[in-house]
Amino acid sequence: MNSSTAEQPSSSDSGASPAMETVSLAVDGASYEIVLAPNEASALRNDLAPYLAAARQRCDPE
């Protein structure tokens, strides 16, 4: 997952917290971005950690 801090809205996409970070991810060939507060981004990473540990990272040719 990648993250950046450019052009953030004032609240997270979940609406629960102030936004601070954009998290990028891809599932089933579709790419997504979601704006999250730091605690939400951390929770997402923690939830995905077991799956990412078992996954292979794909490197796209440039």
Image (spheres, rainbow, N blue to C red):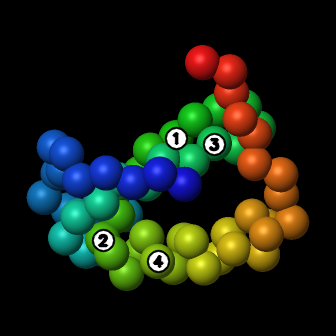
Which label was assigned to residue 42? 4
Identify the mark nearer the N-term, 4 or 2: 2
Residue 40 sits in quarter: bottom left
Callout 1 crowding tier (Cα within 10 Å): few <14, some 14–19, many ≥20: few
Instruction: Work out which quarter of the rendered image holds the C terminus and state it.
Output: top right
Mark 3 and mark 1: span between their CA atoms? Answer: 6 Å
Amino acid on which disc 3 is placed: Ala
Identify the mark nearer the N-term, 2 or 3: 3
Residue lying at the far front of the rendered structure = 62
Of helix, strand and loop, which one carries label 1?
A: strand
Indicate left or right for 22 with 10 as reference: right
Q: Is residue 7 above or below residue 46?
A: above
Mark 1 and mark 2: span between their CA atoms? Answer: 16 Å
Callout 2 crowding tier (Cα within 10 Å): few <14, some 14–19, many ≥20: many
**Closest to the observer: 29 or 57?**
57
Mark 4 and mark 1: span between their CA atoms? Answer: 17 Å
Identify the mark nearer the N-term, 3 or 1: 3
Mark 3 near mark 1, Cβ–Cβ under 8 Å? yes
Mark 4 and mark 2: span between their CA atoms? Answer: 9 Å
Amino acid on which disc 2 is placed: Ala
Indicate left or right for 47 with 54 as reference: left
Identify the mark nearer the N-term, 4 or 1: 1
Of helix, strand and loop, which one carries label 3?
A: strand
Residue for badge 2: 37
Amino acid on which disc 4 is placed: Ser
Residue for badge 1: 32
Mark 4 near mark 1, Cβ–Cβ under 8 Å? no
Residue for badge 3: 26
Which label was assigned to residue 57? none
